[in-house]
Image (cartoon, helix red, strand yellow):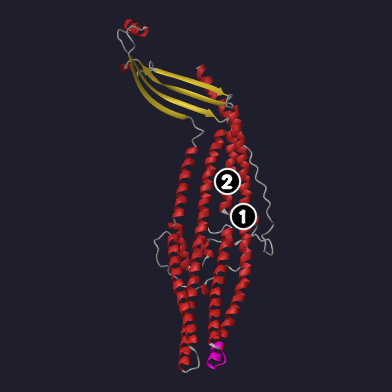
C-alpha cells in the first residue's frame, strides 16, 4: 500500500510541476507602418477588402467563373489537401501529453547446454533440458512536461495548421484576382477585335474610293497599293486578336479547372463596373487581413515555439515508465490470478551532460532562425504596403489616362471624317486619309487597353488589401 502511495505522489508532483510551467513568452515584432496609405486623402477604417468577392464583382458571368475556379482550381484543391493533412497532425498533437501505452505478448523457449551450469540446474531441479517463459504485459511510458516542451510541440502543430489555412486563403485571393484579370483582358480583346473590324470597313471604303479615282486618273497606282496595304495590315491585326482571344479563353478555362474551351461573355467592356469608392482602410488592418502576411507572422510564432523546445531540451527531463501483466514458466498456469501477476514502476530524471554543447548550438540556431523570420515578416508587410501604394497610384494615373485617351479618340475620329471629305474633294492625298485611319485605330486600341489596365489596377488593389478570400 505504501508503494502505491509513493507512485501516486510521484505522479501528482510531476503534474503539479507541469501546471506551473508557462510557454516561452512571445514578443510581437515591432512594425513601422504609416498612418495611412500613400495617395489616399484621409485615414479611413472602411476598406473594399471587407467586401465578399460576390459583392465586389457584380458581373454574373464573372461570378460564375470565379465560383468554378474556387471549386475546381487545382492549386486550391492541393492547398485544401494540405490543410486537411495538417489538421490530422494537429489532432495527433493533442495526445502528446498523454502516456504512451502498449500491450505485448511474448513466448520464449530456451535450451541451454547440458554441460553448462544452467543446463545441469534445469535437469536437477525441473527434470527437463529446456525452459519456457510466457509473458503478457501492458507497458506505459510518460514524460512530465516540466519545461513546456510538449506544449510547444503542440503549438508548432497548431501554428503549422493555421499556416496551411492562411496559405489556402492566399491562393484563393490569387485565383480570384487572376480569373478577374483574365476575364477583363478577354473583354478588352473583344473590344479591340470590334474596333479592328470597324476599321477594316473604313479601309475597304478607302480602297474602293482610291481604285475609282485611279481608274478615273485622279490617283496613282501607289495610292491603291498604300490603301491595300492598310487593309491588309488591319486584316493581320484581326487574325492576331482572334489568336489572342483563343489563348486567353484557354488560360481562363485552365484557371477554373476545365479543359480549354470557349468562354461565354454577355457584356462588353464598356458595361463593366467595379466599386468606384475605393476605400483602402488602415495599413494595420491590412496586415491582419491579408493571408500571406498573416502566414508569415505565424512562421514567427512557430519559430518562437521551436526556440522553447530547444531551450527545454537543455533541462532535466522526468520520465516515468511502468509495466505489468501476467508471467509464467508454464503455459497451463500462465493466466493464473493472482499468482502470475507482476508489475514494476520506474521514475527517473535525466540531465544531458555530454550533449550540452550540441543542445546549446541547437538553441542558438533556433534563435537566429526566429530573428530571420521576424525580418521576413517585416519585409512581407513592407511589400504589401508597397503593392497597395502601387495599385493606388496606377488607378489614379489610369483614370487620367482614360480621360485623355477618350478625348484623343474623339479628335481622331473627327479627323477621319475631315480627311475623307478633303480626299473626295481633291484637297488631301491618300496618305493623309490612311494616316488618319491608322492613328484613329491605334488610339481606339489604346483606349481599350487603358480601360482594361484601370480595371486591373482596381482588382490588384482589392487583392493587395487582402480581399478575395471571403
Tag on residue 253? none
Residue at the spot x=58%, y=54% of the render? Answer: 290
The span from disc 2 to disc 1 (Cα, nearest Å) is 17 Å
Task: Please say if 78 is above or below 436.
Answer: above
Range of residues picked out in magenta: 419-428
Q: Which residue is mark 1?
A: 383
Q: Of marks 2 and 1, which one's residue comes earlier in the chain?
A: 2
Which marked residue is nearer to the observer: mark 2 or mark 1? 1
Residue 314 seen: no
Task: Depth check: give the residue in front, 62 or 396.
Answer: 396
Q: Main secondary structure of the magenta part?
A: helix
User: The residue tagged with tag 1: helix, strand or loop?
Assistant: helix
Residue at the spot x=46%, y=54% of the render? Answer: 75
Task: Please say if 390 is above or below 159.
Answer: below
Density class for disc 1 (Cα within 10 Å; few <14, some 14-19, many ≥20) is some
User: The residue tagged with tag 2: helix, strand or loop?
Assistant: helix
Q: Which residue is mark 2?
A: 298
Task: Depth check: give the residue in front, 393 or 347.
Answer: 393
Q: Inspect the magenta stretch and tell me whether residue 134 lies in it.
A: no
Residue 184: x %, y % from top left: 51, 68
Residue at the spot x=48%, y=89% of the render? Answer: 210
Which residue is the extreme one toward the front?
A: 221
Amino acid at each position: 500500500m505504501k508503494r502505491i502511495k509513493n507512485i501516486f505522489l510521484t505522479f501528482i508532483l510531476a503534474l503539479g510541476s507541469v501546471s506551473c510551467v508557462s510557454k516561452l513568452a512571445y514578443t510581437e515584432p515591432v512594425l513601422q507602418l504609416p498612418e495611412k496609405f500613400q495617395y489616399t486623402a484621409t485615414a479611413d477604417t472602411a476598406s473594399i477588402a471587407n467586401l465578399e468577392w460576390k459583392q465586389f464583382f457584380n458581373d454574373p458571368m464573372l461570378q460564375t467563373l470565379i465560383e468554378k475556379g474556387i471549386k475546381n482550381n487545382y492549386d486550391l484543391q492541393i492547398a485544401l489537401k494540405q490543410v486537411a493533412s495538417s489538421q490530422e497532425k494537429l489532432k495527433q498533437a493533442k495526445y502528446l501529453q498523454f502516456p504512451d501505452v502498449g500491450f505485448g505478448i511474448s513466448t520464449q523457449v530456451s535450451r541451454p547446454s547440458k554441460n553448462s551450469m544452467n543446463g545441469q540446474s534445469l535437469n536437477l531441479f525441473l527434470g527437463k533440458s529446456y525452459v519456457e517463459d510466457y509473458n503478457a504485459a501492458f507497458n506505459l511510458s510518460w514524460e512530465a512536461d516540466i519545461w513546456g516542451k510538449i506544449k510547444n510541440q503542440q503549438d508548432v502543430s497548431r501554428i503549422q495548421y493555421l499556416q496551411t489555412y492562411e496559405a489556402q486563403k492566399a491562393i484563393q485571393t490569387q485565383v480570384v484576382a487572376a480569373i478577374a484579370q483574365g476575364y477583363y483582358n478577354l473583354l478588352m480583346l473583344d473590344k479591340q477585335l470590334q474596333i479592328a473590324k470597324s476599321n477594316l470597313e473604313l479601309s475597304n471604303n478607302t480602297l474602293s474610293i482610291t481604285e475609282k479615282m485611279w481608274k478615273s486618273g485622279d490617283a496613282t497606282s501607289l495610292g491603291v497599293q498604300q490603301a491595300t496595304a492598310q487593309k491588309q495590315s488591319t486584316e493581320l491585326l484581326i487574325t492576331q486578336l482572334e489568336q489572342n482571344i483563343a489563348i486567353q479563353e484557354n488560360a481562363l478555362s485552365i484557371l477554373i479547372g476545365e479543359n480549354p474551351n470557349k468562354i461565354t461573355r454577355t457584356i462588353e467592356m464598356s458595361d463593366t463596373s467595379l466599386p468606384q469608392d475605393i476605400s483602402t482602410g488602415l495599413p494595420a488592418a491590412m496586415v491582419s487581413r491579408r493571408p500571406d502576411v498573416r502566414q508569415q507572422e505565424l512562421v514567427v510564432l512557430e519559430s518562437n515555439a521551436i526556440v522553447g523546445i530547444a531551450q527545454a531540451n537543455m533541462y532535466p527531463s522526468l520520465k516515468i515508465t511502468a509495466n505489468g501483466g501476467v508471467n509464467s514458466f508454464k503455459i497451463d498456469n500462465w493466466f493464473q490470478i493472482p499468482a502470475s501477476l507482476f508489475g514494476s514502476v520506474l521514475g527517473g530524471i535525466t540531465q544531458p551532460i555530454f550533449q550540452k554543447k550540441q543542445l546549446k548550438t541547437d538553441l542558438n540556431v533556433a534563435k537566429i532562425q526566429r530573428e530571420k523570420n521576424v525580418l521576413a515578416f517585416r519585409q512581407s508587410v513592407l511589400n504589401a504596403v508597397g503593392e497597395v501604394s502601387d495599385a493606388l497610384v496606377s488607378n489614379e494615373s489610369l483614370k487620367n489616362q482614360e480621360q485623355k485617351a477618350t478625348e484623343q479618340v474623339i479628335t481622331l475620329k473627327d479627323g477621319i471624317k475631315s480627311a475623307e471629305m478633303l480626299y473626295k474633294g481633291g484637297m488631301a492625298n491618300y496618305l493623309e486619309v490612311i494616316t488618319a485611319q491608322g492613328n484613329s485605330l491605334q488610339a481606339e486600341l489604346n483606349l481599350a487597353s487603358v480601360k482594361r489596365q484601370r480595371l486591373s489596377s482596381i482588382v490588384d488593389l482589392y487583392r493587395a488589401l487582402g480581399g478575395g478570400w471571403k
